[in-house]
Amino acid sequence: MTVGLFNTGVDFALFTLLTVLVGVNPLVSNIVSVGVAMCVSFYLNMTFVWQSAKSIKQTAPSFFAVTIFTGWGVQGAVIWGITSIMGDGDWQSMGAKVVAIAVGMVINFLAYRYIFRSTKPTAPIKK
């Protein structure tokens, strides 16, 4: 859960920085923020969350396909839909991103369970 919150924070913070402070279009900001968060998310999910015994070659293509679909496709569609109706002001764009993140999170979590879950038992984490 901590990793998910961290990734979400990276995504939302970068989106807000680009959209509100720099004035970048919300859809372009979403592409950049999701791209950065996606790379961070892959590493943290593979290493800490799922502790996957699968190789990067086995997990990366599926992970990036799912994340690109949800991050750029689903989130982009939600942001476009909301800002088309409500306008693309700062508050509308940030609200659209919050809704988009929530929708994408559900899809990502369900897919990541399948991608990273090993069929082999993993060693317990040493504390």
Image (cartoon, rainbow, N blue to C red):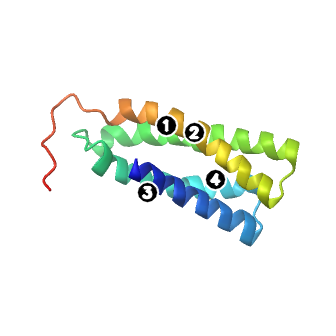
Q: Describe residue 103's horizontal placement relative to residue 67 as left or right.
A: right
* Coordinates of residue 107 in the picture (x, y in percent): 52, 33
* Coordinates of residue 76 in the picture (x, y in percent): 69, 43
Q: CA distance from mark 3 to mark 2?
A: 16 Å
Sequence-first tag of 3 and 2? 3
Sequence-first tag of 3 and 4? 4
Sequence-first tag of 1 and 3? 3
Residue with the mark numbered 2: 104
Q: Secondary structure at mark 2?
A: helix
> Closer to the camera, 48 or 120?
48
Q: Secondary structure at mark 4?
A: helix
Q: Secondary structure at mark 1?
A: helix
Q: Is residue 31 above or below residue 51?
A: below
Sequence-first tag of 4 and 2? 4
Q: Given contact means CB atoms under 8 Å apart, are the residues at marks 1 and 3 in contact?
A: no
**Could you say which quadrant of the image residue 52 lies in?**
top left
Could you classify mark 2 by the number of other residues whose Cα lies within 10 Å: few (under 14), some (14-19), or many (20 or more)? many
Q: CA distance from mark 3 to mark 4?
A: 15 Å
Residue with the mark numbered 3: 40
* Coordinates of residue 88 in the picture (x, y in percent): 83, 54
Q: CA distance from mark 1 to mark 4?
A: 16 Å
Q: CA distance from mark 1 to mark 3?
A: 14 Å
Residue with the mark numbered 1: 108
Q: Given contact means CB atoms under 8 Å apart, are the residues at marks 4 and 2 in contact?
A: no
Could you classify mark 3 by the number of other residues whose Cα lies within 10 Å: few (under 14), some (14-19), or many (20 or more)? some
